[in-house]
Image (tube, rainbow, N blue to C red):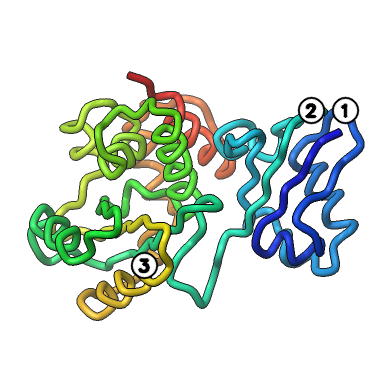
Amino acid sequence: MITIRLLGGAKKAVGKPAVDLDRQSASVAEILQFLTGISTDARLLQPNNLIVAVNGVDSAALQGQGTVAKSGDTVTIVTVVHGGTDYYMIDSNHRVSIIGIRRITEDAGKLVDRLRSEHPGVSIQAVNADAVYGIDHLLGVLRVTLEAEKRKVMLANRRETELLLRLARTDQISDAMKKAGLKNGSAGCLIAISQENEELRHFSESIKNRFEVDDSVLEPSRQKRDLLTGMLELKAKFDDHEFLQYLLERAAILVK
């Protein structure tokens, strides 16, 4: 028996907080197919809108929809917030505001220091938009970061630094700044993590009032892929999904 816990929109779709799947094993794809079959609103169960964790480990950091749950396991499914809000849900406790900026026009270090001073209840990091291969990439790295924090296996002392290291796929801060650090005159990405929706709303409003916000700078592109492929010295050919999974795997395997 596999226990499936449902949160947010997933709970609304199925009409209950948990269901049991009477099977010895099932992949994430098969579990979602099962839930779709018993739901009243399948739109709330679109894979791209969900975080699926097996025994507390995000399936995106494992084998994605091919991740297999076995009898006795607990699968937790959380709806990711999209559109019309100021944040995404990373897991059941943490939300994140992710904002693309067309061009950073001030000193990057001073900008981050000022934002952290103005929003003390929020964990804030800023990165080069070219290091972000789409929102799913950044959300995946954020989940890996929080999992490392939870398991006390972080490479850094602060989650903001941990995020930068894992996004850059390195354990060296200087290397991470070179590969993924915010750069003056370039497109950037501002990231704020909190458990409080209101704090993230204030952060989002503050950024939108000060900068030229443009989330399109975070989208995957051929230019970004070529840049990241060069950094990774990749020889193998990947499709977009495989490339994203490779980036997330590289972020997850970093250890002290």
At mark 1, the secondary structure is: loop
Q: Nearer the viewer, residue 189 or 234?
A: 189
For the residues bearing labels 1 and 2, Cβ distance under 8 angstroms: yes
Q: CA distance from mark 1 to mark 3?
A: 41 Å
Q: What label sits on residue 70 in the rendered view?
A: 2
Earlier residue among tags 1 and 2: 1
The reply, left or right, for residue 31 in relation to residue 90 is: right
Q: What kind of residue is marked 1?
A: Gln
Crowd rating for badge 1 (residues with CA inside 10 Å; few <14, some 14–19, many 20+): few
Q: Secondary structure at mark 3?
A: helix
Per the image, the residue denoted by label 1 is: 24
209 up-or-down from 216: above or below: below
Where residue 73 appears, as percent x and y from the top left, is 74, 31
Label pair 2/3, CB-CB below 8 angstroms: no
Q: Residue at x 78, y 35 (%)?
A: 27
- Circle 2 packing at 10 Å, graded few (<14), some (14-19), many (20+), is some
How crowded pointer 3 is (Cα within 10 Å; few <14, some 14-19, many 20+) is rated as many
Give the labeled residue for mark 3.
Answer: 200
Q: What residue is rendered at 51% in x and 26% in y?
A: 236
Locate residue 81: give its quadrant. Answer: bottom right
Spatial CA distance of label 1 from label 2 is 6 Å
- Residue located 71% across and 59% down the image: 10
Is residue 49 toward the left or the right of residue 256 in the image? right
**Amino acid type of the residue that numbered disc 2 sits on in the rendered structure:** Lys
C-alpha distance separating marks 2 and 3: 37 Å
- Tell me: residue 199, above or below residue 139: below
Residue type at numbered disc 3: Leu
- The structure residue drawn at horizontal position 67% and vertical position 45%, both measured from the top left corner, is 76
Using the image as rendered, state which of residue 239 and residue 5 is in the foreground.
Answer: 5
Quarter of image, res 164: top left
Q: Which quarter of the figure is the N terminus placed in?
A: top right
